[in-house]
Image (cartoon, rainbow, N blue to C red):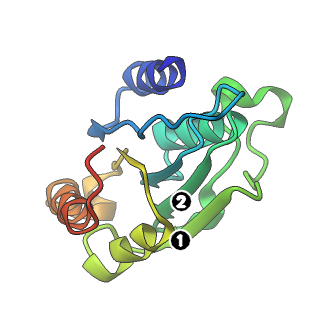
Amino acid sequence: MTKIRSLLTAAAVLGTTTAFVSPQQRTASSSTSLDATIAVFGASGLTASECVYQALQDGDKVVGLTRNPSNLKIPKGSGGADFEKPLTNPNLTMIGGDVTNAADVAKVFENGIDGVIVALGGKTSDVGDSMLTDGTNTIMAAMKENGVKR
């Protein structure tokens, strides 16, 4: 639960997360990791990159969806001297796509997702008037279809 609080705190401080749903805690782990696979939508953004980084640091797997995966960088907040370097990790899968496209969102859920973080954002001129609402609705529909409740 400490990790979930940390991710929520990061999201609250940065102020752009539209929704946060926590992964299920599993037993038989001796680390602080939840041993979860976490989906992060809007993964290369300021808030989401912090969530991605912290989850990976805790040993969880992350599947991210973003318009441009190469934009994912180590965040300034937690990344220390490595901030702004490309964020790579064997437990990280990045998918390029559009959150309003059900087929792109479905690709994320092919990975056995335990929990979801929705951190969509961007300038209206770049993403359109309805991306936040349409994208969140697409994600919620995929969560229901795949039995992901958190």
Q: What residue is shown at x 30% (from left), y 55% (from top)? A: 148
Query: Could you tell me residue 97's position as x and y percent?
Result: 43, 74
The 10 Å Cα crowd at callout 1, few under 14, some 14 to 19, many 20 or more, is some
- Name the front one of labels 2 and 1: 2
Q: Which mark is residue 80?
A: none
Q: What residue is shown at x 48% (from left), y 23% (from top)? A: 10
Residue to which mark 1 is pinned: 95
Q: Residue 63 carries which label?
A: 2
Against 60, residue 54 (above or below) is: above
**Element class at badge 2:** strand
Query: Could you tell me residue 22's position as x and y percent?
Result: 38, 36
Labelled pair 2, 1 in contact (Cβ < 8 Å): yes
**Element class at badge 1:** strand
Query: Could you tell me residue 66's position as x and y percent?
Result: 47, 63
User: Three-letter amino acid code at disc 2?
Assistant: Val
Q: What residue is shown at x 35% (from left), y 51% (from top)? A: 122
